[in-house]
Amino acid sequence: MSRFRNLVLVSLAAAVVLGFGLLGPLLYRIFIGYDPSGFFAGEWSQRMAPGFPRAIGGFVLFVAGLLAVFAATLWAMRAGRRAPTPGADSGRRRFLTDGAAALAVTAAAGGAAFARAGFGLGNEGHGWLRVGSGIGAEAPTTHPQFHEHWRGARVRRYQRLGRTGFEVSDISLGSSRIRGEAGERLVREALDRGVNYIDTAPDYSAHGSEEAIGLAIQGRRSELFLATKFCTALGHLPAGTPVDRYKAVIEASLQRLGTDYVDLAHVHSCDEDDRLMDENLHEAFDRLRDEGKVRFLGFSSHTPRLVEVADRAILSGRFDVMMLAYHHGIWPTIGDVIARARRDQDMGIVAMKTLKGAKHQDLAGFQQERGAFSQAAFKWVLSNPEVSCLVVSFSEPQHVDEYLHASGQSATERDQAVLRRYDQLVAGTYCAPHCGACLDRCSAGLPIHDVLRHRMYFEDYGWEKNAMELYARLERNAAVCAGCAAPCANACPLGVPIQQRMSEAHDLLSLG
């Protein structure tokens, strides 16, 4: 038994090292969203899933790594045992014991990988959970009640986009959800209302965004500033991509957009210095600029290393525009980054992810407000005079009226109150990072994070039936909290009052 235990411990240690050192960086790259060329044998893997909208190469490698850990551990358990005791029962027990050990070791490898990629352990704190629960998530995008005084809203302010010299609409059109005839109509309506900056990319709606925009802007190209990205429909191009391929993806965008030039090409969702400063990328841009196909170079980032990447871009002097995640309550250092970009390089600043997110139904609490949460959030962003414009995804006809109503307006005390109220609704209720810090404090072994998630489905997503069914399947539910001494108190780093939320969840989700 001691030999078996030592084998398990050694295997666990090796799995954690492998998870941190190899699988963790791979998982981090998967979250970035690379094109198949960003992964070993990625283009070959993609042939196994023709038509799939995202690159699968990274997932294939990650799963293969976990399977290799499982197989190697199982082999080590079997090979490391002494001569087996005769008997079928003994053989079955050994098989089950070895299999359980291999599963535990594999889970350790996967857990270590997620700890690095998600929480940033061993990666200078750069993890994707913060991005996914804050920057990357968005609040509801449409106010639940249309107000008649919004109708016919137009752009009322244009601002200089840094050293490009172009005067852009302060609220501009993001197109990640636009496609087809409905998308065309939405783009035309926005242009008619004064929007003159359009942001698109090949990976928005799998080329659908660029195609719809291309049809909508025919005959109006000279009226607008048009931005796209160095990427494909499947994801971002990795550092080291050949110059000709960098050029080819922009030229393919030009064909879909029905134009012979774009004003701006971004290095898309950039998290790494090597991709930002890739010599091939910059040579491709210089050639495209000399050929009259692209006028300016930019980068976009809403990734864990946003600040570091932005600092490098400013120092390089190569970039004309930066598009950054920016909303109320975001990292305080981003304001300084924006100020330095304007002061040192006169870069144009485009804000994105402006609808600070967490929960999906919070806007229902603002139905009596004359102003929407979106409008308050936009006015907060545009109160920074260094921000040239904000880009937000238009996806419904109401967005043209609702969003443009905030154009040219300053944030009022009522707007500030709306933002504070939103934060109050979120604070202390939302298990944002799912960090598990509270789990060991529960003597009953209650899966607190699952209970909070099911409650969120019920209250914030409107999935009442599904939430109750999921809650009913839990081996332990929050009934155990009644009369408990609450050792979980103060265990949540976000201040969630665990026992109170658990008891309320049980009353809300119980079928009985």
Image (cartoon, rainbow, N blue to C red):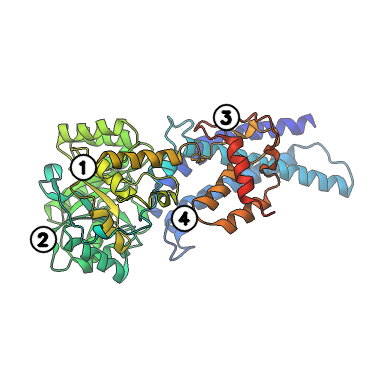
Mark-to-mark CA distance, 3 and 4:
38 Å
- Mark 4 neighbour class, 10 Å CA radius: few under 14, some 14 to 19, many 20 or more: many
**Picture disc at residue 2:** none
**Picture disc at residue 491:** 3
Q: Amino acid at mark 4?
A: Ile
Front position among marks 2 and 3: 3
Front position among marks 3 and 4: 3
Look at the numbered disc 2 and give the secondary structure of its residue: helix
Q: Is residue 55 visible?
A: yes
- Please identify the quarter of the rendering in which residue 184 is found: bottom left
Of callouts 1 and 2, the N-terminal one: 2
Of callouts 4 and 2, the N-terminal one: 4
Give the residue pinned by disc 1. 410
Q: Amino acid at mark 3?
A: Ala
Q: Amino acid at mark 1?
A: Ser
How far across and how far down the image is residue 151, in percent?
Answer: 24, 61
How far across and how far down the image is residue 101, in percent?
Answer: 71, 40
Front position among marks 4 and 1: 1
**Picture disc at residue 222:** 2
- Mark 2 neighbour class, 10 Å CA radius: few under 14, some 14 to 19, many 20 or more: few
Q: Quadrant of the N terminus?
A: top right
Look at the numbered disc 3 and give the secondary structure of its residue: loop
The answer to whether residue 448 is above or below residue 264 is above
Q: Amino acid at mark 2?
A: Ser
Which residue ends up furthest to the bottom in the rendered image? 181
- Mark 1 neighbour class, 10 Å CA radius: few under 14, some 14 to 19, many 20 or more: some
Mark-to-mark CA distance, 3 and 1:
40 Å
**Picture disc at residue 56:** 4
Look at the numbered disc 1 and give the secondary structure of its residue: loop
